Image: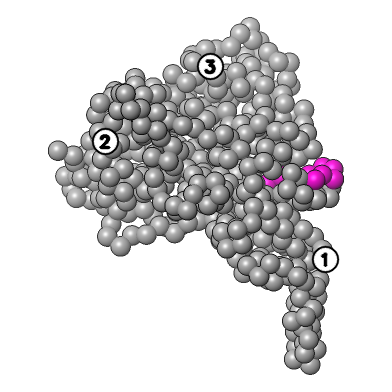
Amino acid sequence: MYRLLYSLPIPVIIFLLLLFFIYFHPFFSKHSSSKLSKQPKQLPKSYPLFGCLFSLAQNRHRAVLWTSKLFQKSSLSTITLKGPFGKKCVLTRNPSIIKHIVKTHFHIYRKDPIMQFVFSDLLGDGLLLVDGEKWKTQRHFLSHIFHADTFRYRIKSATIKELSGRLIPLFSSATIDKATLDLQDIFHRLTFDILCQVGFSHDPEYLLPSLPRKPLIDAFETAIKISMGRFTCPSILWKAKKLLNIGSEENLRYAVDVLREYLKKRIAGKVEKFSMQSTSIDEGGDFLDRFITRALKCNVVVDEKFVIDTGINFILAGDDTLFSALIWFFWLVSSHPQVENEIVKEIKEKNDDDLNEMVYTHASICESMRLYPPVPLELKQVTEDDVWPDGTKLKKGMSIFLHVHAMGRSTELWGSDYESFRPERWLVKNLSTGNWNFIPRDPFTYPVFQAGPRTCLGKEIAFMQIKLVAATILKRFRIVPLDGFSPVYNSSLTSKMKTDFPVRIIQRC
């Protein structure tokens, strides 16, 4: 989809617009309706030479919602969109195809080079962008870190400390002052503080009562936004701006420099320190300590850029996705009082050591991420000709979108009430005990955390943190969105709200 808009030189765009004018001018277009490429009527019209270019351009800022609606209107599980000069990309929400791509034929599907190209300035050679041996090596020793009990304990402790020491006092003050808070901003400050403490042994203190400036968060948001903008900007244009260091590319360079300078200070001396001593893993260390020592133990060449790239990937994977999940969870729960009451009832019966027993809360989290997956699209490229289980034929080099957002809105997968926020769809009542039993879905029907070899390493950690935040807040407070507020979905790398999320905080009796 993005690939169809990508890399068109400006002269080509002008040429296409001229052809469009000529083709549809009344003098030439007496029979133009018969010249349109055949396409199901629910899908955008595809014109000779142009394909769906004009629909793609018109909806480029709402690509996730637009393409998700195409699936719903057409009832198709796989959609092919045509671009200029016969270029095509394929979008799918079919679980059997998802399994085909991410597991059984994993070896012929790679990260799309366009994704790597537009995000390389920000993410470098980190795990989220690389393929092949680089990915295998990083994945190997990162999996040891994320599955270590000591690392999970460090994350849990930091989360509890941030909640009790900062979030609860902030919310308590808001109840007294009857203040309005932007919950999206609050959650981003919360998750970023936790991540920096766990990852880099540094506390930015963004969740202090004064809600100070947050230059690191702002830099990261700017870098993501401009990098995403490259998808829909002619490559010759943004490359020229990058070369001249002007406009958005100047802002991107500054934002990336802010992040890299921050991480440079955090890793100062670490590589030399761990290189000179035993390479035994520091079980009490932060993420960077563990990463460096694990890499050295695996005989991986560790330099400053490699560690900084990993740190930035850690921020994207551990912060952006978590706070995205939190904002939609609290929006949905606050909009469904019956669900909120069930969660509060369960939370009051448990304590922080019983997180795994919070079955209804767990189902509610899964349900919110079904409707608003933190990462709504996954972009791949096929490296050789292939045929999918539904008969779709792919040519080497084609771009593939795994549409996680559309999968959560499929009648075939979730029933006719797929638009409803209903945690009970994940639960079965135990008739003998009266308790709920959680019934998981397979990762190809519910690929929120991806599936196959690239399954998210932080899946269980994410559930633990969301439950901690939910239990801490909902046990003590009610989150009440301002009257008339309705969130606008922001189509980006992760699922966010386009505007603030204004709420009032009310103390529970």
Where in the figure is residue 474, as x and y percent of width and height? Answer: 28, 37
| Residue projecting furthest to the left | 509
In the image, farthest residue toward the front: 431
Q: Secondary structure at mark 2?
A: helix
| Residue that label 1 marks | 85
First in residue order: circle 1 vs circle 3: 1
Q: Is residue 243 above or below residue 192?
A: below
Q: Quadrant of residue 7?
A: bottom right
Which of the two residues, 128 or 485, is positioned nearer the viewer here? 485
Q: Residue at x 53, y 29 (%)?
A: 458
Q: Nearer the viewer, residue 295 or 101?
A: 101
Graded by Cα atoms within 10 Å as few (under 14), some (14 to 19) or many (20 or more), the crowding at tag 2 reads: many
Residue 457 visible here: yes
The residue closer to the viewer here, 451 or 256, is 451
* Residue stretch in magenta: 379-387
Residue 380 in magenta stretch: yes
Which residue was labeled with disc 3?
Answer: 148
- Residue at figure coordinates x 82%, y 66% from the top left: 85
Image depth: mark 2 or mark 3 in front:
2
The structure residue drawn at horizontal position 28% and vertical position 37%, both measured from the top left corner, is: 342
Q: Amino acid at mark 3?
A: Ala
Label 2 sits on residue: 344
Relative to 220, is 402 on the left or the right? right
Neighbourhood count class around disc 1 (C-alpha, 10 Å): few under 14, some 14–19, many 20 upward = few
Label 1 – label 3 distance at C-alpha: 51 Å
Vertical relation: 414 (above or below) 102: below
